[in-house]
Image: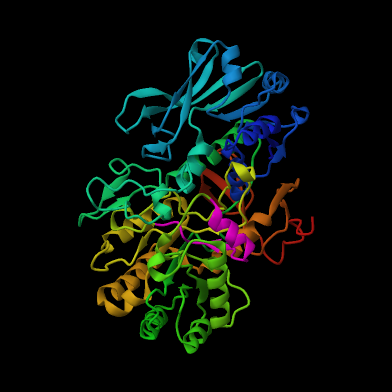
Amino acid sequence: MNMAKVAVYFDRTSSLKRWAAGENVFEIYLKHVLEYAGIPFTWIENDEEISNEYDILILPLDPIEQSSNDRIVEFIVQGGALISYGGLKEIGARLGCRSKEIKKGYADGVNEDIHVSLRFLKAITLEGLSDKVEITEERGILRSNTPIGEKAGAVYQRFTYGKGEVHRWAVDIIGSVVGFQQGTKPITEDGVRAPDGTANLDDQLLKADDGFELDWEWDRSITETGEKYFTYPYADLWKEVLIAQFLRTALQKDKTLPIIDYWPEGIDQVAMISHDSDINQDESAEMTLEVLKECGLKSTWCMMEPGYSEKIYQKIEDEGHELAFHYNALETDEGFWSEAEFSRQLSWLKQAAGKSEIFSNKNHYTRFEKWGELFDWCEKHGIQSDQTRGPSKKGNIGFLFGTCHPYFPVSWADQNNRLYDVVEISFLTQDVDLDRLADKSIVKPFLNNVKMVRGVAHFLFHQIHIFRQQSVRQAVKFVIQEARRMGFTFWTGEQINKWVRERLKMKIVGINPDGSMKVANAVENAVILIPVSNKEKVNENELVNRYGLPCEKHVINGKNLIELGDKL
């Protein structure tokens, strides 16, 4: 089967105009979503490059020039497939349609593989579309504000236009993904506390969870013991919806779009345990090391000034754990929010631990201000991965930021919404079974929903609580036992960061006539997947299900690296 040719047209004129006005163009984040999925595509910013040599054209941002819209219409008319997310106002206007914006809501029946209502942060419907064109497929129901709110139109519509077709999602999927992961505005004030008193965000301390975009009532579930938690990784689920549709569209054209699997061969999903040193008692470190050794686990140790004794650092490293940074900006601890203080504390850690490089950071108490200052500091001072984005309260644990996958955050408009060179690995909860936090009834729901999207189940346990409370020690063992039972592989933050970066360098170049792959910068044990139709005969390779489709599995190993195009 031939590989579909995909182009993403990102209208530069429109984006520059919006950036000049101080407006965000989060639509640019589609590039990272596609790269993370390993989908081969061409990114174009000049409308003269739009042509029917491409099978599929993705339009994340509506162009403002008439000539660009004319080229897009011509592409469709000549037989191309166009995909849009809440856009196509100009084409809709040509058809005599009116657009209507829905601010926040839920989408039911998005596809046959997702059986939950998906929250979104914005959608735009085209009213009257069904009267103007032949709609060949319509899927899902938009509901305003709540999962039981007023029906507001279809989630997805496919219609013919000339010889081609248009796939239009009413939901602004990319804007919703960014909004879930990073919020919709800089953090400059306390968040709104939970109405039931389970999460007092209004504590006069700026932190990551002051900027979340979920609903206290509709987005939390309750365990059998009464623990409340944010249930679903909405951002990850929307990304899966988006990717699944690309793959299906290619198959509908009797072509395919190969992808790079999330994890290397033999790994289905990843779990991670990190610790924050906080009180810095050597005895707590010794106890934690004993528990981890008993469980055969390597973890990530985030160190806060003044830290442990020198012998502890050596023991942590000798036993294969990662030494990481725990930046403290709490004024009650004589810390403060500034790049100079971030740099000073990081220099202290390197000297105390005898390290020339530290790869990971997590801010004490999830302290966070504005939009991307922390990521700017991480870039400048060599921190490759951050773990700050997680819950600080008992009542907002779970998928607070809609994701359990590692991702590169996007900057604000003042930096033209570039990607920060920092891998964010958010966490789900702190100190399971600590007397004042959530009990272990949340562990299985968390693991189940991470497994659903094959992400990272990241649990935070403070060494001091492992030392002081037997229940926390047992909870560590329970998390490890349950995760392994459910097929999770434990990695440190440094391992996750390294894999994500190596994997993103890989590029699928093409499919050889014999069915083998052409891959640039191939990585040992990476998995390439070729979606196939159910009726299609495949080679002798194993078939696995991804995004609701059967996929032919190719594992990169030492024997086939050259064949796969490692030197391309």
Residue 500, picture quadrant = bottom right
How far across and how far down the image is residue 179, in percent?
Answer: 47, 42
Please indicate, yes or no, whether residue 8 appears anywhere in the rendered image: yes
In this picture, is 206 found above or below 154?
A: below
Q: Residue at x 35, y 67 (%)?
A: 479
Q: Is residue 396 left or right of residue 57?
A: left
Image position of 399 with respect to 358: above or below? above
Q: Residue 410 location in percent, x, y?
A: 57, 47
Q: Quadrant of the C terminus?
A: bottom right
**Range of the magenta residues?**
372-390
Q: Is residue 378 magenta?
A: yes
> In terms of image quadrants, where is residue 296?
bottom left
Q: Which quadrant holds residue 487?
A: bottom left
Residue with the most extreme left position:
225
Q: Quadrant of the N terminus?
A: top right
**Residue 52's spot in the image, x, y percent?**
74, 27
For the point 34% across and 73% down, the residue is 477
